[in-house]
Image (cartoon, helix red, strand yellow):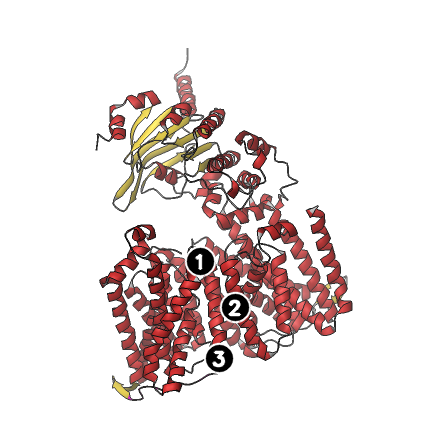
Amino acid sequence: MRSANDVAREGLTATVEARPVLEVRGLVRRFGGLRALDGVDLEVRSGEILGIIGPNGAGKSTLFNVVTGLIRPTEGRVYFRGRDITGLAPHEVCRLGVGRKFQVPSCFSGLTVRQNLQVAARGRWPVARLVRAGGDSRERWSDVDDLLDRLGLASKADLEAAALSHGERQWLEIGMVLVNGCQVLLLDEPTAGMTLGETRRTERLLRDLGGAHTVAVIEHDIRFIREVAERVIVLHRGRVLASGTIDAVERDERVRDVYLGRGE
Amino acid sequence: MTRRWRVGAITAATLAGSLAPWLLSPFEISLAAKAFTFALFALGLDLIWGLGGILSFGQAAFFGLGAYALGILTRDLPDAGILGLVAAVGIPALLALALGYFTFYGRVSGAYFAIITLAVSLILTQTAQTWVELTGGHNGLYPVPFLTVSVPGLGGFGFDSDVDMYYLAFGVLLVVFLLLRRLARSGFGQALAALSEDELRLQFLGYDTRQLRLIAFTLSGALGGLAGGLYASQVGFVNPTVLGLTLSTQVIVWVALGGRGTLVGPIVGALVVSFVEDYLSDVLVNVWVLVLGILVLLVTLFRPAGLLGSSRVQRFVGLR
Amino acid sequence: MDQVILQGLNGLSLAGILALVALGLGVTFGLLGVINLAHGELFMLGAYTVLVVHRATGSVWLGIALAPLVVGAVGAVIERVVVKRLYGRPFDTLLATWAVSVVLRQAITLWQGGGYQPIPHPITTSVPVFGVQYPAYRLALLGLGAVCLVLVGLLLYRTRLGVQARAAIQNREVAAAMGVNVGAVDTLMFSLGAAMAGLAGAAMGPLVTVNPSMGLPILASSFFVVILGGTGRLLGVAAGAAIIGGGQAVASFFTNPVVAQVAVLLLAVLVIRVAPQGVFGRRPA
């Protein structure tokens, strides 16, 4: 006989496991008269890769901006591992474990590729440790070296980031977010401007992350989303229009309307 | 190869600096000592401007505060050299800390920071001019004795000649240079370099950029104060010009011409410019200032990294 | 009582001059996002224009009339040669305009000497105001400030050029695509700001002795006017000028002028800290 208590405990354990890593509740963000986010609820579950799609102006980047603390929501809350992180500064959100890649690749173009990764790797260190960390040549950076290989940037490690191609800069920035050590990664259009080959490579990179990271990725490229995302959310006019597997979402009549422009 | 070259260059400079007093006249020795303290001051500005990417237009506030702190303390307590130096470093550092906290944490940044530092330097100048009992007003504080450091139980040592002051200034400059060089190559220095490029990106990597700036600015204030303290005991008097706009802009010129973001550049800039000025006659001074103005204008327009600051030169000399 | 009225009038006439200088600064800062550290020297150039013209022709009025043209032309050259290359680099702009200020000051020193030189008052009569005899010229300054405020307002809000200038600020690319010559608008606006500084310096010349460093204190004060009043609204500039000018006059009535200046500086620093957005408008540099 199982006691009611046991059942309750099991239920509790189950909810803890299914508990989303990142949770957004009733998020509203107004810019003047425009409601860029209009009551968004969503959750990102531990270890999953969530695709976020939607037409231009749907509020995708604004969502990331609010979650990472760049702008404050007008209403609503953001929770990370059950903790209310609404209104924290970007560096605090990052230090808790939410990393972000920008839409426009923004690595430090005056630093070398390796230095970019080093700066990213030390991002969450306390200052005292930063000061003690000596010259870059002597320090052991096995994870940076590994990453350089995985990104295919090993041969360019000591070039200034300004010398990289657009696709390489995108990879470098993805690498920076990875080496930064956050468990949750928010990627804003990681394949924008990439050639087909480069996009393929990025797909492999993301899939290799496996269950170790939790990823939410904004992308316009549906084919890419189909390759990497286990679950998809469609944003439209600041609201969640649909969610589910990519097939389910693509069959959804409302989503087709939005993408084909019939629902306007 | 380049590393050996660098170590060689630093060793050679150290040797040259140590042996120079045998070759120079007493007048030149005191000029050189003064130029070293200016170089120290320039390194302080370089820390916040060259590495940290924001320009302080009132850096003389720290220099002057250091000079007055040490001047007033050693005027009244001639043996309290150590206490004087601590105050000369600590008080300006505290001011920088307060000012930095006030601005960086208040989302006031960019060009307004330059204006605020300018205003603070003006306020301090006027205070020094009016608070005659403490500072001697326009006439200044006189005389500031030579620096005497004494440790209870161990006796004291007086830097009581121009040659002593020369070695003191040179030694401090060398030590600060080596420490800053280390700092610039540390994770902290790298973060500062990244900060001057893209602050937002750095925040999203977890860096508290306000804190980074605050530390850099506090250090820069402390260095300014140290330089000011040494200056006061070198020249033997302090008047309100050490707090003023002219000195603030002079140090900007040294760093701008020498090359911001490098460590050797500001030192060279300070040494060359202040030496040239000491040898100019009164008539030529106006022409010289005009020439400096034009030079700064040209450098800003065409060589923003300074005369020594192109990345090729930097890499060759190993400045960063 | 007479003292109070006198100080009040002094404050107002100072406010008139400050409003002119600050308006010029506000135009370059607010419209172009350029903090022009040479603005005080443009003010000084205006005064020297009067000095030189008066010496050559004997007329102060001709000097005052020519000053905005001369200084406006100098401003246009500065914008074309220096400022234009540095848009989007605020610290370099600061540094370069500071260098320009040094060059102007030294050039005038070498040409005219570094000493103090007087300009005769163009109006020497006094008029009774609230029972106090007050110099008419100082009252004229107040009027000049007010008239210029109105004229600039009309220029920016009622003319084609003003619309173009404001369009260029909102969005350079779109304005350029709509056929606005963005570069020319920048130059014109900078030149306009310079001309106002020059006019202020020319008008102020007869009240003070003219010297190459006369721009420094006026630059500091007018910065604080812009900081207080913001750059977006002309009325803000006027209000800021009244507060700073009046405040300095009132404070120096009660305490000594140095304390008054320190108080004003502290106030300005506090304002920057407390209300950077609200006071500066929506265009942080």
Report if residue C12 lies within the magenta region: no
Q: For residue C238, what is the image quadrant?
A: bottom left
Q: What type is the residue that disc 2 sits on?
A: Gly
Can you give x and y, in whole percent of width and height, for residue B239 in the image?
58, 74
- Disc 1 or 3, which lies upstream in sequence? 1
Task: Tell me if A73 is positioned left or right of B5 in this view.
Answer: left
Can you give x and y, in whole percent of width and height, for residue B172 in the image?
68, 60
Q: Is residue C104 above or below residue A168?
A: below
Q: CA distance from mark 2 to mark 1?
A: 17 Å
Can you give x and y, in whole percent of width and height, for residue B78 in the image?
68, 71
Q: The N terminus of chain C is located in which quarter?
A: bottom left
Q: Is residue C62 above or below residue B59?
A: below
Indicate which disc residue C86 carries: 1
Task: Tell me if B27 is positioned left or right of B253 in this view.
Answer: right
Q: What type is the residue that disc 3 sits on?
A: Trp
Can you give x and y, in whole percent of width and height, for residue B305 in the image?
54, 56
Instruction: State which chain disc 3 sits on.
Output: C
Instruction: State which chain disc 2 sits on.
Output: B
Q: Would you say the residues marked 3 and 2 are in contact, meaning their CB atoms lie under 8 Å apart?
A: no
Q: The C terminus of chain C is located in which quarter?
A: bottom left
Q: What type is the residue that disc 1 sits on?
A: Leu
Q: For residue C16, what is the image quadrant?
A: bottom left
Same subunit under labels 2 and 1? no
Near-viewer residue (C117 or C141):
C117
Query: Depth-wise, is mark 3 or mark 2 nearer the camera?
Result: 3
Residue located at (59% from left, 63% from top)? B225
- For the record, the magenta segment spans C111-125
Near-viewer residue (B169 or A96):
B169
Report if residue C118 lies within the magenta region: yes
**Residue beneath label 2, please?**
B293
Residue located at (64% from left, 36% from top)? A140
Indicate which disc residue C111 carries: 3
